[in-house]
Image: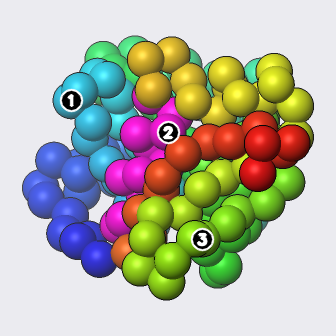
């Protein structure tokens, strides 16, 4: 669990709090995909997004980067399901105790959503699961393949 928040991350969390009145537990600056990923406290997601995503647009204009938000959950399975939303996750399987965890989606259309363009969504899941639960995410599989 490598959760260390630097000065820039703290500044971004404070900017979110000022603009949206919601609380972020963590902030990840992902330079590879030029985005900022916020982990929002449970129950604050609607407040953070705002009406029709207005708060996200304002924050994107202020920070100059794409903004993504994930609602935190107490269990690892619920957190992984929140990361991959709007894709519908039907199950999470672990082959070996210390091996990577495979995520199972229901429909073929959810497969593309879960992986994301150039693998950005699966990379977001890998970063956040490593930070919060020390879990490695393996592959995204279709329900019938698993």
Residue at (67% x, 66% y) in the render: 93
Is residue 127 on the magenta stretch?
yes
Instruction: Tell me if 36 is positioned left or right of 68 in this view.
Output: left
Q: What residue sits right under mark 2 in the picture?
A: 122
Task: Tell me residue 76's x, y (percent).
Answer: 61, 73
Residue 65 numbered tag: none
Labels 2 and 1 touching (C-beta < 8 A): no
Crowding near pointer 2: few (<14 within 10 Å), some, many (20+)? many
Residue in front for this viewpoint, 10 or 74: 74
Marks 2/1: CA–CA distance: 15 Å
Secondary structure beneath label 2 = helix
Vertical placement of residue 11 versus 63, above or below: below
Residue at (81% x, 21% y) in the render: 109
Residue 31 numbered tag: 1
Instruction: Tell me if 118 is positioned left or right of 41 in this view.
Output: left
Q: What residue sits right under mark 3 in the picture?
A: 94
Crowding near pointer 1: few (<14 within 10 Å), some, many (20+)? few
Marks 3/2: CA–CA distance: 16 Å
Instruction: Tell me if 62 is positioned left or right of 80 in this view.
Output: left
Task: Tell me residue 73's x, y (percent).
Answer: 65, 71
Q: Which residues are magenta?
A: 120-132
Residue at (70% x, 63% y) in the render: 92
Task: Tell me residue 127's x, y (percent).
Answer: 36, 52
Residue at (46% x, 63% y) in the render: 100
């Amino acid at each position: 669990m490598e959760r260390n928040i630097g000065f820039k991350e703290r500044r971004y969390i404070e900017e979110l709090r000022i603009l949206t009145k919601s609380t972020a537990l963590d902030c990840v600056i992902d330079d590879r995909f030029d985005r900022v990923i916020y982990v929002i406290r449970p129950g604050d997601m609607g407040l953070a997004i705002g009406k029709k995503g207005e708060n996200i647009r304002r924050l994107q204009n202020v920070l100059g980067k794409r903004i993504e938000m994930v609602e935190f959950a107490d269990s690892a399975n619920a957190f992984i399901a929140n990361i991959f939303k709007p894709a519908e996750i039907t199950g999470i399987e672990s082959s070996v105790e210390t091996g990577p965890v495979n995520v199972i989606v229901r429909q073929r259309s959810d497969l593309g959503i879960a992986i994301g363009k150039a693998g950005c969504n699966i990379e977001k899941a890998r970063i956040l699961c490593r930070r919060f639960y020390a879990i490695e995410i393996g592959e995204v599989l279709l329900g019938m393949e698993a």
